[in-house]
Amino acid sequence: GAGVSQSPRYKVAKRGQDVALRCDPISGHVSLFWYQQALGQGPEFLTYFQNEAQLDKSGLPSDRFFAERPEGSVSTLKIQRTQQEDSAVYLCASSLALGQDTGELFFGEGSRLTVL
Amino acid sequence: QKEVEQNSGPLSVPEGAIASLNCTYSDRVSQSFFWYRQYSGKSPELIMSIYSNGDKEDGRFTAQLNKASQYVSLLIRDSQPSDSATYLCAVNQRAAGNKLTFGGGTRVLVKP
């Protein structure tokens, strides 16, 4: 498809397990963002890539969270030793623009993580 | 104080009426402002962007920006049941590395 694709759509993990969430952005989109959205809340910024470079990771809540985009296209968000407070929807967004000048982020459908 | 604040609602409006949504932000250097619509269980989608003081109209939607008051609003005219969704205000702060900061969203319910 032509949109941002995320997988898995749903993930249930036991506390302490590691998870990996994948994002396939729109082809040609330079910028890629990860957001975390808790139930009933707005999306919270996690990290930003411009091509393969991670330019901002200030929103990652702890060192258990790690993101990469090695070839400047597909990105993976990894969460190690998951905790219950990690339960949320993880949204990936991409943009043709450098940075967020236009704010025209195209979001994927998200990966809903539930940690038991 | 949150960087971007919205009333969580729900804002209940009758079909055909005007829905008025408000958003305030704390950082005076903010330069770009956006409204996203999010249906339940779906991802946010951009509906309006505004960069300068005043009004911007697009179909049934009007965005209003007042940088002096650090206030941005969204009006939805002739509200339809299909407008029932959560509306997210987002602010771009270039000084913060082009981070797009979202408010908590306002849930709108349009009753037939």
Image: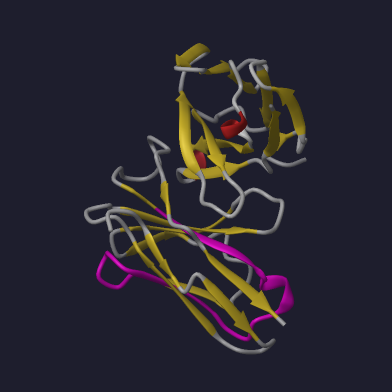
Query: Does A81 lie within the magenta span?
Result: yes
Q: Residue at x 67, y 17 (%)?
A: B69
Outermost residue, left side: A28
Q: Is residue A40 left or right of residue B79?
A: right
Evaluate whether residue A91 shows in this view: yes
Segment colored magenta: A68-93
- In the visual, does A91 lie left or right of A93? right
- In depth, the one of B3 and B8 nearer the eye is B8
Q: Residue at x 25, y 70 (%)?
A: A71
B37 relative to A36, above or below: above
Return the x and y of residue B60 as percentages of the image width and height.
51, 17
How far across and how far down the image is residue A42, in percent?
A: 64, 48
Measuring from the top left, give residue B8's x and y in whole percent.
76, 38
The residue that appears at 77% across and 40% down in the rendered structure is: B1
Figure quadrant of residue B112: top right
**Name of the residue lying farthest toward the front:** B112
Residue B5: percent from left, percent from top: 71, 35
For residue A30, above or below residue B11: below
> Along the line of sight, which residue is nearer the eye, A98 or B82?
B82
Residue B79 versus residue B105: which sits nearer the camera?
Answer: B79
Q: Is residue A113 magenta?
A: no
Q: Is residue A21 above or below residue B38?
A: below
Q: Residue at x 27, y 54 (%)?
A: A2
Color style of the picture: secondary structure
